[in-house]
Image (spheres, rainbow, N blue to C red):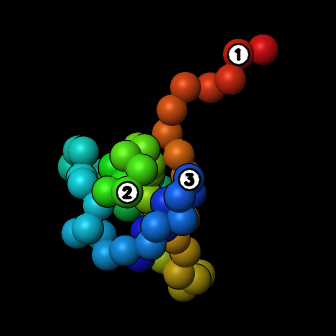
Amino acid sequence: MPRCPSCGYEGDLSSFTQLREPWKYNFYTVYRLRCPVCSIILNYYVGVSPKGKKSSFSFKVGSRSKK
């Protein structure tokens, strides 16, 4: 279940707007989503490691801070 890192909204995958097709990154499936509450774009990673551990996390996608 994805959780928005900005506003804390947690909902089913279908409640978020999917911006592109999911892709594979190592053993993760990555979803590019838009939060229905605060409209930020986030990546949601979900997968099972080779050792059998379930893992899922999300982080905000956007411009990096300037140095």
Residue at the disc numbered 3: 6
Left or right? Give the position of 60 relative to 13: right
Disc with the residue nearer the chain's start (3 vs 2) = 3
Residue 27 seen by the camera: no
* Residue at horizontal 29 percent and vertical 61 percent from the top: 16
Label 1: which secondary element = loop
Residue at the disc numbered 1: 66
The answer for how far apart the CA atoms under marks 3 and 2 are is: 10 Å
Count up the numbered dots: 3
- Judge depth for marks 3 and 2 and give the one in front: 2
Residue nearest the viewer, comparing 15 with 29: 15
Disc with the residue nearer the chain's start (3 vs 1) = 3
Q: Amino acid at mark 2?
A: Val
Residues at circles 1 and 2 in contact by the CB criterion of under 8 Å: no
Residue at the disc numbered 2: 37
Disc with the residue nearer the chain's start (1 vs 2) = 2
Figure check: 25 above or below 45: above
